[in-house]
Image (spheres, coloured by chain):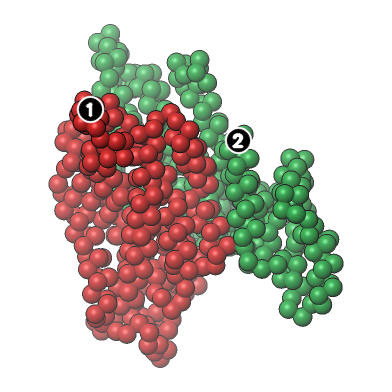
Chain colours: A green, B red
Amino acid sequence: MISLIVASLVIFACIEVIPGDPASFMLGINAQPDTVAALREELGLNASLSVRYLSWVTGMLSGDFGTSYTYRTPVAEIIAERLWLSLPLALIALGLTVFIAFPIGILAATKRGSWTDMSVMGATQLGIAVPNFWFAMLMVLLFAINLRWFSAGGFPGWDNPFAALKALTLPSIALALPQASILARVMRSALLDTLSEDYIRTCRAKGLTRRQALWRHALRNAMIPVLTIIGLQFSFLLAGAIIIENVFYLPGLGRLVFQAISQRDLIMVESVVFLLVFAVIIVNFAVDLAYAWVDPRLRARV
Amino acid sequence: MRNLIVGLTLTAIFVLAALVSFLWTPYDVTVLEIANKLKPPTFSHWFGTDHFGRDIFSMIMVGARTSIAVAVVAVGIGMGLGVPLGLAAAARKGSFLDEVIMRGNDLIFAFPSLLIAILITAIFGPSAVNAIIAIGIFNIPVFARLTRGAAMSLWTHDYILAARVAGKGATRISVEHILPNVANLLIVQGTIQFSLGILAEAALSYVGLGAQPPTPSWGRMLADAQTLIALAPHVALFPGFAILFTVLGLNLAGDGIRDLLDPKLRVQR
């Protein structure tokens, strides 16, 4: 809660530093001084800093993010529309990350030191080093331009869910690849740590097979570091979507922010950034709750 | 050991390319030869030419300067501010100062790194300097946390007590006894942040918030290549490989140094 308040102050302060008066920027250089003054009045720019900050925050609390300087429509509406692209994109990418990383990490940990382990870990080194937007471009070259399996960009809207999912396939793979590589490595080392614990030896001694010991005991205990990383990764995915949306010309939050920045649409920038930070803080809180779910010992402390 | 050698070799190649580019490049990257544009790789142009007829091999050499400079300075900012903050927080553990430093760290962590970078470059305008500041700011909490964590466990050691008995103050102990003992960790983390910095710089230049034309940068070469990828794939391939191998080299070097400095971890692998 406190971090939210401080975050909102920081964002507000940052935005106020942007040079240029939004009112004169919107009206162009030929505007009459009195029209500019009228617009400043209308936008509430004449009020003192503290009043503007308070009205911004109280507005957000009631779901009113204000009116966009350039679009002349409520910011909340525009953001909600764009969120319908960015949020599913980040969630699909997160799902893919987990879906790829878990089996790979488990495989590498159980076959530790083998050729499988070495080649898989080598592949994850590459996956971490690849810039995701470049990987996205290569996928466009192969799957969209050469094989023509996917379109190279754009988004058809959710009216046709299949087409929409298809448009998000390549972007989410590009987003997921580096994160999956990181997560697979974390999974592997966390599993290796737990597999060398005494209680795993006890499990084996009481007659469980390696597989049973792994699935019933080791995996669950290895989840704490894995969950921490997944929580962090969600914020990377949300922010990373900003870059990837540019590769695929997807009308999401990322493109919105860039347009808003170039148009000096302060309210829009403030709101999107705050929303993303808010999402990150919420996700971190959810991760804390998940710890308690995974590890009963932590329940008393939460 | 093999990791370290491969990693250091890859890193050395790119550092060398950046250094040599100050003295010599195969072609002048400021000269545009439109007649020669989008040539595929040949013997005279190893990596082909771009849409202005510039030699891509030369541009990658010059681009290495930007990437390396941005990443080095960003790591410098992170270490220069983060390490003293971490040392101070550990020396006054549980104090108001510690609390403020750590909550400040949490706050920066709550902003996704890329978002900070975009916010900063949006406010102060896109340039290589602002990209450096943006990436550097995110490095501060990374180093502050690492230093604080490591320093806190060192403070319980007997030799620190001995130093206190000898009359040394918290600042002197931090600098003379704590810092040398966390240096190994810092070097390893430094290599990792270095590679992340190169990736971040590439991403920022790609969306047009990094180094501005005419300074060649790997990220912007890729942005330029995006619309040409169907016509001339080589324009997109080589800058990407440059980023990939530099980052890979740094990561391998980081792993290698860690194994070298901490034999316990080596056995575990």
How packed mark 2 is, by other alpha carbons closer than 10 Å (few <14, some 14-19, many 20 or more), is: few
Three-letter amino acid code of the residue under disc 2: Ile
Instruction: Report the residue marked by disc 1.
Output: B165
Q: Secondary structure at mark 2?
A: helix
Q: Residue at x 42, y 55 (%)?
A: B136
Q: Residue at x 60, y 55 (%)?
A: A14
Q: Tell me residue B244's x, y (percent).
A: 33, 59
Contact, mark 1 vs mark 2 (Cβ under 8 Å): no
Q: Residue at x 76, y 49 (%)?
A: A51
Between B239 and B68, the one lying in front of the other is B68
Q: Secondary structure at mark 1?
A: helix
Q: Quadrant of residue B248?
A: bottom left
> Is residue A244 at all visible to an observer of this figure?
no
Q: Tell me residue B130's x, y (percent).
A: 47, 63
Q: Chain of mark 1?
A: B
In space, the residues marked 1 and 2 are separated at their CA atoms by 40 Å
Q: Quadrant of residue B250?
A: bottom left
Q: Kindly indicate whether the residues beneath marks 1 and 2 are on one polypeptide chain.
A: no
Instruction: Report the residue marked by disc 2.
Output: A2
Q: Quadrant of residue B198?
A: bottom left
Residue B244 shown left or right of residue B256 in the figure: right
Three-letter amino acid code of the residue under disc 1: Val
Q: Chain of mark 2?
A: A
> Is residue B103 at all visible to an observer of this figure?
yes
For marks 1 and 2, give the one nearer the viewer: 1
Between B105 and A150, the one lying in front of the other is B105
